[in-house]
Image (cartoon, rainbow, N blue to C red):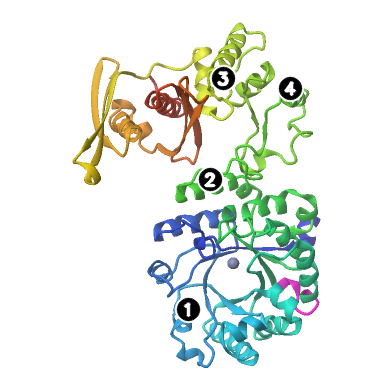
Amino acid sequence: MTREMTRERLYLFDTTLRDGAQTNGVDFTLADKLVIARLLDELGIDYVEAGYPGANPIDTALFAERRPLHAKMTAFGMTRRPGRSASNDPGLVTLLDAQADAICFVAKSWDYHVRVALETTEEENLASIRDSVRAAKAKGREVLLDCEHFFDGYKAKPAYALACAKAAYDEGARWVVLCDTNGGTLPHEVERIVGEICARIPGAHVGIHAHNDTEQAVANSFAAVRAGARQIQGTLNGLGERCGNANLVSIIPTLKLKKEYADRFETGVSDDALTKITRVSRKLEEVLNRAPNRYAPYVGDSAFATKAGIHASAIMKELNSGLTEAESYEHVRPVTIGNRRKVLVSDQAGKANILAELDRIRLAVDKDDPRLTRLLDVVKEREAIGYAYETADASFELLARRTLGSVPKFFDVSYFDVKVEQRGQNGGAEVLTTAVVKVKIGNEMLINAAEGNGPVNALDVALRKDLGKYQKYIENLKLTDYRVRILDGGTGAVTRVLIESADETGDHWTTIGVSPNIIDASFQALMDSIIYKLVKSGAEA
Ligand SMILES: [Zn+2]
């Protein structure tokens, strides 16, 4: 209780849908934006900056109606143009009419940019800030001012950069946000400059917006908090222009789990919401149709992975000796962020790794069971010919369950045929791919044919077109990544295919196939993915 009372409130502002939408190759639809806004809301983010009304049809439509969220729905836009009145600037009028709880204005705070980019006077820029803040407040909106290029501006002319921030604060803006727009400022500079600003504007009204161009956006955000700032702006998975914005998916667990911050600050993210952050991070990648970064801190697949046999056996010893967590090898408990410990099964691993992995998938087996030795032998044999079970967790689980005798025989593929043909001639030629698959389920024979975008896709579509009584389990199964590697070049080359799949619950898993033939390797990985999904869903043979 005393902790609650003495902790200061720190506010989280997400701009995945605005600054994050500037990322190369990212194009959110309106539906995507609404899905992501809801994820952010579930997480307990205070502000969701959802777009720039008037800048494009999607953002205009987004702000045309109220979107009920706990978070403050924030619209982004520019302060009034130099030489115009607030009511005479159509961009500002559109922004003021947007259905938003808060408005985040962006304004220049570097005298050089005021002269060269804005082609106006320093005084007119200050007047534009004051007028815009006043107009938004008159509309009943909470107001934030993003001071663009603040740190470079402050280094060039401190009094003017400060005057821009002060103008907004004195006019009643809830927040002035110091932006490291080109991402080049270093943590010790951020800490010094934010400290100087917080001596003149209360830190409870100061925010930080850091970009990741020296890979220190997260460190810069914490430097600003140490110096007094009480709002952090960032994006999910560090999405953003160039090298991205400060990654809230890394910042939030640090705020919640590291004593220095957890003891001093409170955020809108509950302990329960924190356990969803791994899923939220992966869900964003799914919306973007990208493979999740397995090396991401806290939430990556490898964040709590151990390969060396000696570590794995030490972790098992800690767990068996009554310690509930493998404290000496993990800086935080994976379960607190919804991630999991992963003990990698590999050719250098011993029985301890296998046992740990079986424990995770809740396959009870005695450590002296001879089937365990057989499983270890099979893993070693298969890894020698190119399988990599440390990556393909779902294929490992199937192999283990089969060796221990618990995978039902759901169906048989008795035949498949893939045909690739070229029609037409020369430059105008069209390549068509078709696949036919015969599937036997009990006494029933199903024949599926499909066209596809290449042989693997055709095979996948045909295989999953009709699986009879199992169809309902695989309806929401999606392939999210497909990777091919050729092992040992030359005539003896072998192809390794890794397929990543996901389903409606947000789970994702990886399966593997190895063969001299790429279609065969892909087929193995596809089959494993489907069978894994059936096992996971509790389908009965
Ligand atoms: Zn930015």
Of callouts 2 and 1, which one flags the residue occurring earlier in the amino acid sequence? 1
Which type of secondary structure does the marked residue at label 3 adopt?
helix
Which type of secondary structure does the marked residue at label 2 adopt?
helix
Residue 176 at x, y percent in the picture:
66, 75
Q: Which mark is residue 373?
A: none
- Is 222 or 67 nearer to us in this picture? 222
**Given the current orientation, which residue lies at the most extreme left position?**
424
User: Real-space Cα distance between discs 2 and 4?
Assistant: 30 Å
Seen at 38% across and 25% down, the residue is: 523
State whether label 2 is within 8 Å of ligand 1.
no
Q: Which residues are magenta?
A: 198-204
Q: Which residue is mark 3?
A: 383
Residue 220 at x, y percent in the picture:
72, 61
Q: Quadrant of residue 356?
A: top right
Q: Quadrant of ligand 1?
A: bottom right
Q: Is residue 3 above or below residue 540?
A: below
Characterize the local packing of mark 1: few (<14), some (14-19) or many (20 or more) Cα atoms within 10 angstroms. Answer: many
Q: Which residue is mark 4?
A: 313
Which is more foreground, mark 3 or mark 4?
3
| Viewer can see residue 66 | yes
- Is 406 or 80 nearer to us in this picture? 80
Identified by mark 1, the residue type is Leu
Tell me how many marks there are.
4
Of callouts 3 and 4, which one flags the residue occurring earlier in the amino acid sequence? 4
Mark 4 and mark 2 in contact (Cβ < 8 Å)?
no
Which is more foreground, mark 3 or mark 1?
3
Q: Quadrant of residue 44?
A: bottom right
